[in-house]
Image: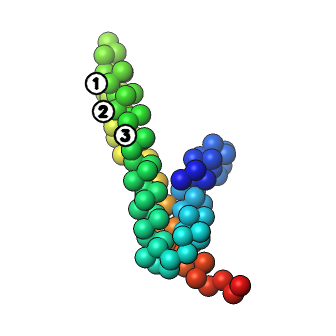
Amino acid sequence: MICTLIFYFVPAVNAIAPLLGGLLAGYYADGGFGGGLKSGVLMTIFMIIPGFLLGGILGTVLSEAPVLGGFVAASAFIITIVIVAHTAITGIIGSIVGALLAGRKVI
């Protein structure tokens, strides 16, 4: 998860940051398909918690804005769901691929 967060701050790499973070997590988990799936789901859970907390705080603060408050609050929730879904799907795929690659290493 830490690698994913670091990759999110690198321009042009942030689109595949969950894939790279999941790849590293799955490679170090080294449990085959099941181990990769477990580490990907764990990464997703740890990314969901701060995402919804920050999205909820942003939505609550901006909901009192005079003209577009309700729209901004709803948009914050929808954008949070899209980002979490992107992180979950690509992170789990990367984690599974990393675990399968770890199983193929020769040394």
Neighbour tally class for label 2: few under 14, some 14-19, many 20 plus, Cα within 10 Å = some
Give the residue furthest to the right.
107
Q: Is residue 89 above or below residue 101?
A: above
* Residue 20 pos. (x, y %): 60, 60
Neighbour tally class for label 3: few under 14, some 14-19, many 20 plus, Cα within 10 Å = some
Q: Residue at (57%, 47%) from the top-left corner? A: 5
Q: CA distance from mark 1 to mark 2?
A: 6 Å
Q: How are the residues colored?
A: rainbow
* Tag 1 and tag 3, C-beta contact below 8 Å: no
Q: CA distance from mark 1 to mark 3?
A: 17 Å
Q: In the rendered image, is residue 68 in sight?
A: no
Which residue is under mark 3? 52
Q: Is residue 97 above or below residue 79?
A: below
**Amino acid type, mark 3:** Phe
Residue 74: numbered disc: 2
Mark earlier in primary sequence (2, 3):
3
Q: Residue at (71%, 85%) from the top-left corner? A: 107
Neighbour tally class for label 1: few under 14, some 14-19, many 20 plus, Cα within 10 Å = some
Give the residue furthest to the top.
66
Q: Kindly report which numbered mark, 1 or 3, lies closer to the viewer in this rendering.
A: 3
**Amino acid type, mark 1:** Gly
* Residue 79 pos. (x, y %): 39, 40
Label 3 secondary element: helix
Mark earlier in primary sequence (1, 3):
3
Q: In the rendered image, is residue 102 in sight?
A: yes
Q: Residue at (42%, 55%) from the top-left corner? A: 44
Q: Is residue 2 above or below residue 107?
A: above
* Tag 1 and tag 2, C-beta contact below 8 Å: yes
Residue 70: numbered disc: 1
